[in-house]
Amino acid sequence: MCELGEEAEDEATLLEVRALLPVLEGRVSKMEFARMLSGEHDSFNAIFSINAGAGGTEAQDWADMLMRMYLRYCEEKGFKTEITDYQPGEEAGIKGVTFTVEGDYAYGWLRAEIGIHRLVRISPYDSNARRHTSFSSVFVFPELPDDIAVEINDKDLRVDTYRSSGAGGQHVNKTDSAIRITHIPTGVVVSCQNERSQHKNRATAMKQLKARLFELELRKKEEEAAAITGDKKEIGWGSQIRSYVLHPYRMVKDHRTAYETSNTEAVLDGDLDAFVEAYLLSRAG
């Protein structure tokens, strides 16, 4: 239409094209979104977990920074979050945290973040102001609806109770309401401590266990299929996916897509859409 309008010097046609462009861009955007988030479980809510790597206080502080980053990202996306398990560090930061994420396509968006996240900076905990490298892992599971059955044998479970260690709440450190469940055959451990009721904490922990076991079974089938076909697709679980460098220069780079930015402050404040979309589009292709 542009070519025809220019050839005929028809200003009305060119004006019509300009009016159509936003409509077409909107349609293309919706098509890209549908292609990115077309996975079987992408529309589900998510269970998000962060764990500090080796390195003591430095790694635990990095895990705390990641928690803040992801909670802000979820807030910007309009997702509702609730911390179900919180393990503070000895001096600063956190050893680990688990929170649920409720919202449209929460799992579809957040699955892009599964893997190891690396931080390089001058440590605020080093009196000699040396550069440190820290690692934390991120795991994301789809929160399964009740109509999806996952068989769990009570004989395979070890259930421990302990006192809550999270921040806030009058019940913290006063009652053994927190629950830790170990699935003995797989070694999967889940815990919940945000409710006053031991019964409610157990129900939430069982929901997390169900999601973890479901994910393990899916991964097993993917690996078996890859072995048969010789298709060695990167799963990304446990691999270093992104580096956040704050010294000697400032850069955040995703190693899967090569997308990078020097605006590290914005990223650590939760501005992650560009990274997430670049990864999801690359996988959809």
Image (spheres, helix red, strand yellow):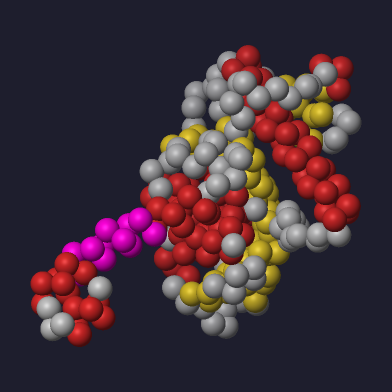
- Residue 24: x and y in percent read 31, 61
Q: Is the residue 170 above or below the residue 9 in the image?
A: above
Placement of the C terminus among the 4 image quadrants: bottom right
Q: In the rendered view, would you say 248 is above or below 115?
A: below
Q: What secondary structure is the magenta-colored segment mainly?
A: helix
* Magenta span contains residue 24: yes
The answer to whether 232 appears left or right of 276 in the picture is right
**Viewer-closest of 267 and 105:** 105
- 193, above or below 47, in the image: above
Which of the two residues, 21 or 51, is positioned nearer the viewer here? 21
Among the 4 quarters of the image, the one containing residue 11: bottom left
Q: Where is residue 95 in the image (x, y as percent from the top left)?
A: 67, 47
Q: Please, is residue 118 above or below residue 75 in the view?
A: below
Query: Is residue 33 highlighted in magenta?
Result: no
Q: Quadrant of the N terminus?
A: bottom left
Residue at 20 percent of width and 85 percent of height:
7
Please tell me which residue lies in front, 36 or 16. 16
Which residue is depicted at the point 70% across and 22% down? Answer: 149
Q: Residue at x 73, y 34 (%)?
A: 214
The residue stretch that appears in magenta: 18-28
Q: In which quarter of the image is residue 155?
A: top right
Residue 187 visible, this angle: yes
In the displayed structure image, the side of residue 49 where residue 169 appears, left or right: left
